[in-house]
């Protein structure tokens, strides 16, 4: 008895609790659940509404089929309003200063009365289940600027998947009025190739001590670059940065001329002190002028569109194949036989294709 009374007086007893349902605005709940219509998405995006744009990109990133279907309709609807931006790819190893650079360089772009969208492709997000590029606090000034829009990449998807979604997000950003788009990626592997396939200009950031085997940056990545900027060219690192610039320039001479006829250059900059950034911007504008005049700008975009058509077909075919009931049923068994050496991979592929085609025509 005494025990019971003590419990009542104590603040530590478990109360039955009160329903909070009544405190929630029912209209708000309903509003949150209702999906915008295609028309609403289109109007919002064309109006430059960031919230609607963000939600549409979330649909693009969603794996749910009804979201995907709506996303594809939104992309289609936005397509006539897209294509008018200058797309810049930016890559460099972690720590080279990409986010600091975008934060500072973004100011240069915005000061030109431009609207800037920053999208990120982060292949490491697969492993970390979180985007290291996505953190908006990495670009403190830009993330609060009304003329800038920063969007992290979808975590957990494959590189091909993220790249495709980024490519689709570009279309929406352009329809929303962004005339300059930066696609950022960590320079650690194939992601540069994916970025290269969706941008007009490719910018590689290097550190001042880049003599050391060019910091593991692959030859191919250097070859893709339209401009190499040696970042952190400040303080004690300035002499090393100047040396790196010379080394890069010599290295660039070894590559064959580009299809764009553009001669890749090297620049020094300090994202931290905001120096050298104007010169980089001027190079990008010269590139745009030159390649527009010689027809490469448009031709390159057309080639990229062809590439993405092929990519999409391959992806969709693959999906169709693996999701097919007869493949789902037999794949593991056949794969086991291949691993055990009882069946050659080629014969196995032939058998699977056969069963896929047979069932398809039924
Ligand atoms: P990211 O991983 O490539 O995005 O690199 P961050 O932008 O996060 O920069 C990594 C570190 O380098 C941070 O501590 C920055 O403050 C520093 N950093 C970036 N740019 C410069 C620069 O131009 N000069 C100097 N001295 N440090 C810089």
Image (cartoon, rainbow, N blue to C red):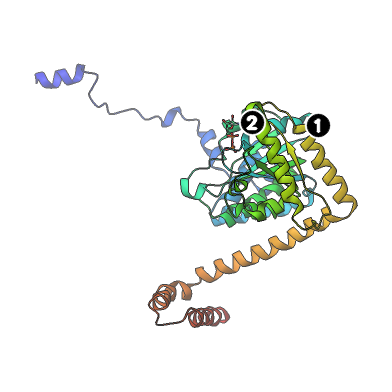
Image position, residue 324 (x, y; %): 51, 72
Identify the residue at horizontal 61%, vertical 52% (top origin).
191
Q: Quadrant of residue 176?
A: top right
Residue 48 visible, this angle: no
Identify the residue at horizontal 82%, vertical 51% (top origin).
262
Distance of label 2 from label 1 (alpha carbons): 30 Å
- Disc 1 C-beta below 8 A from ligand 1: no
Image position, residue 288 (x, y; %): 83, 46
**As displayed, is residue 215 above or below residue 338?**
above
Element under disc 2: helix
Q: Quadrant of residue 190?
A: bottom right
Residue for badge 1? 112
Q: Residues within 10 Å of mark 2 (few under 14, many from 20)?
A: some
Residue for badge 2? 237
Location of the N terminus by quadrant is: top left
Quadrant containing ligand 1: top right
Q: Are marks 2 and 1 in contact (CB under 8 Å)?
A: no
Q: Quadrant of residue 295?
A: bottom right
271, 323: nearer the viewer: 271
128, 315: nearer the viewer: 128
């Amino acid at each position: 008895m005494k025990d019971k009374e003590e419990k009542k007086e104590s603040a530590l007893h478990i109360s039955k609790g009160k329903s909070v349902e009544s405190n929630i605005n029912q209209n708000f709940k309903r509003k949150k659940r209702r999906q915008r219509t295609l028309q609403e998405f289109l109007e919002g995006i064309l109006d430059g509404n960031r919230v609607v744009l963000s939600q549409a990109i979330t649909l693009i990133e969603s794996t749910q089929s009804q979201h995907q279907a709506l996303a594809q309709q939104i992309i289609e609807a936005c397509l006539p309003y897209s294509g008018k931006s200058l797309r810049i790819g930016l890559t460099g190893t972690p720590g080279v200063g990409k986010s600091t650079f975008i934060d500072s360089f973004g100011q240069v772009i915005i000061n030109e009365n431009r609207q800037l969208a920053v999208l990120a492709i982060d292949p490491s997000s697969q492993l970390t289940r979180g985007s290291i590029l996505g953190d908006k606090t990495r670009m403190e000034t830009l993330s609060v600027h009304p003329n800038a829009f920063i969007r992290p990449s979808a975590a957990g998807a494959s590189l091909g998947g993220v790249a495709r979604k980024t490519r689709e997000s570009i279309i929406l950003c352009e329809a929303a009025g962004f005339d300059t788009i930066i696609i950022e990626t960590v320079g650690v592997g194939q992601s540069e190739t994916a970025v290269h396939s969706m941008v007009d200009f490719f910018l590689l950031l290097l550190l001042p001590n880049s003599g050391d085997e060019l910091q593991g940056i692959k030859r191919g990545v250097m070859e893709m670059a339209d401009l190499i900027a040696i970042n952190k060219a400040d303080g004690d690192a300035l002499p090393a940065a100047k040396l790196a610039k010379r080394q890069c320039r010599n290295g660039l001479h070894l590559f064959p001329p580009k299809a764009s006829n553009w001669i890749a250059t090297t620049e020094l900059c300090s994202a931290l002190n905001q120096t050298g950034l104007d010169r980089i911007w001027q190079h990008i504008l010269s590139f745009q002028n030159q390649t527009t005049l010689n027809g490469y700008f448009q031709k390159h975009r057309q080639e990229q569109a062809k590439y993405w058509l092929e990519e999409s077909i391959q992806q969709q075919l693959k999906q169709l194949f693996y999701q097919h009931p007869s493949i789902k049923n037999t794949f593991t068994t056949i794969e086991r036989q291949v691993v055990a050496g009882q069946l050659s991979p080629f014969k196995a592929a032939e058998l699977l294709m056969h069963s896929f085609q047979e069932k398809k025509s039924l």
